[in-house]
Image (tube, rainbow, N blue to C red):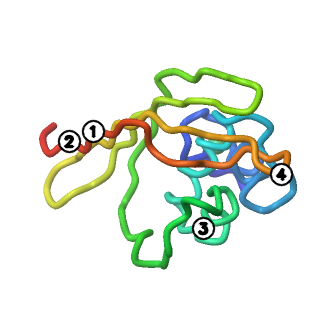
Amino acid sequence: MSTSCPCGTGKPMDQCCGLYLSGKAYPNNAELLMRSRYSAYATGNLPYLIKSWHPDTCPDLNSDDLRTLWLRLEVLQSKKGLKKSIVEFKAWFAAEESERVLHEISLFKLYKKRWVYVGPLEQWPSSHM
Ligand SMILES: [Zn+2]
């Protein structure tokens, strides 16, 4: 497979988030986890989204949550801590005749020695381009 990874690194997917989505490896920092979760949304990998979500905050996801057509990701900044990390990103998706962007500052925590997504600290769903 030489498709480039949806997360925007420019690497082939099987050398980027594909490693995590297939279960061959697990991301060792929050930014990699965030990127792989974006790729999971982009490719419809529901089990991975659940696995990488903190069990206390994970919603009852189903395949309807994966209908969005994701276009691209931009990681703006990440702050690494020992047990908590913060990643700020923008993710573009297709909506009707235009593109929209989800801008979020996400909280990640180390849970059972793995980074997991806890939820947004701040979120700006934008309705204009
Ligand atoms: Zn990737």
Verify CB contact (< 8 Å) between mark 2 and mark 1: yes
Residue type marked 4: Lys
Q: Is the C-beta of the residue carrying label 4 under 8 Å from the nearest atom of ligand 1? A: no
User: Residue sitting at 51 percent across and 59 percent down?
Assistant: 41
Verify CB contact (< 8 Å) between mark 2 and mark 4: no
The image shows residue 109, relative to residue 54, as above or below, that is above
Nearest to N terminus: mark 4 or mark 3:
3
Q: Within the image, what quadrant is residue 30 found in?
A: top right
Q: Which mark is residue 124?
A: 1
Q: Which mark is residue 126?
A: 2
How far separated are the C-alphas under marks 3 and 2? Answer: 25 Å
Nearest to N terminus: mark 2 or mark 4:
4
Residue type marked 3: Asn
> Which residue is disc 4 drawn over?
112
- Which-is-in-front pick, marks 4 and 3? 4
Camera-side residue of 39 and 120:
120
How far separated are the C-alphas under marks 2 and 1? Answer: 6 Å
> Which residue is disc 3 drawn over?
45
Q: Within the image, what quadrant is residue 50 found in?
A: bottom right
Q: Position of residue 122 (x, y in %)?
A: 37, 36
Q: Which mark is residue 60?
A: none
Q: Position of residue 58 (x, y in %)?
A: 55, 63
How far separated are the C-alphas under marks 2 and 4? Answer: 35 Å
User: Residue sitting at 42 percent across and 42 percent down?
Assistant: 72
User: Residue sitting at 77 percent across and 26 percent down?
Assistant: 82
How far separated are the C-alphas under marks 4 and 3? Answer: 22 Å
- Which-is-in-front pick, marks 2 and 1? 1
Verify CB contact (< 8 Å) between mark 3 and mark 2: no
Residue type marked 2: Ser
